[in-house]
Amino acid sequence: MKRLRMMSGVYSTFALMPKRKSWLAEMRRGSLSLDPLVAERPSGPPHRRIPHLRWWIGGLLFASTTINYIDRQTLSVLAPYLKAEKHWTNTDFASIIIAFRISYSFLQFLGGRLVDLLGTRRGLTITVAWYSLMGMLTSLAGGLWSFRAFRFGLGIGEAANWPGAIKAVAEWFPAKERGLV
């Protein structure tokens, strides 16, 4: 519980402002500064609680996982159009899907280790940024090999999403509430 309180602190300009009502009038007169070097700091670290923060975290994890699953299916939905435009056979298209699945299955273990090593926030941020980049770069693919390479890269990034989401839920939600997430 102590760890949750430390992680939920948000530093803002408002934490540096005095707690009196006339701060705006003092600022207009020039006797109050918002510069962190000039302003009076409270004795402890500034702390502002975000209500229901862990549920916001749960919502972000849900959104990330949903995008992850939708991203896997987009190429299958586009399969008839891509096969016709690029003149691919079913075997060619299957090789693209297999490239994603190979990287996803082998790197899921390593993605989980990466999240453990870097921490949940930093690890998930890096992997979400990676698979977002790979998803965008897929639109630049011109041939079969580039599609395979970008889908392989997408599998590398998406592999860490599931272990990272499980770790985040374990960190932010008590055991009695984990079935609700």
Image: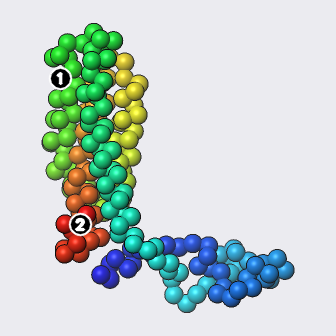
Q: Is residue 150 left or right of residue 22?
A: left
The structure residue drawn at horizontal position 57% and vertical position 72%, both measured from the top left corner, is 12
Q: Position of residue 150 (x, y in %)?
A: 31, 30
The structure residue drawn at horizontal position 44% and vertical position 74%, both measured from the top left corner, is 51
**Which residue is the extreme one toward the right?**
29
The secondary element bearing badge 1 is classed as: helix
Q: What residue type is labelled 2?
A: Leu
Q: Position of residue 82 (x, y in %)?
A: 31, 17
104 w.r.t. 171: above or below:
above
4 w.r.t. 72: above or below:
below
Q: Is residue 30 visible?
A: no
The secondary element bearing badge 2 is classed as: helix
The structure residue drawn at horizontal position 53% and vertical position 81%, both measured from the top left corner, is 46
* Quadrant of the drawing holding the N terminus: bottom left
How is the protein colored in the picture? rainbow
Q: Where is residue 68 in the image (x, y as percent from the top left)?
A: 29, 44
| Badge number at residue 94 | 1
Q: Mark 2 points at which residue?
A: 180
* Quadrant of the drawing holding the C terminus: bottom left
Q: What residue type is labelled 1?
A: Ala
**Which residue is the extreme one toward the top?**
87
156 w.r.t. 96: above or below:
below
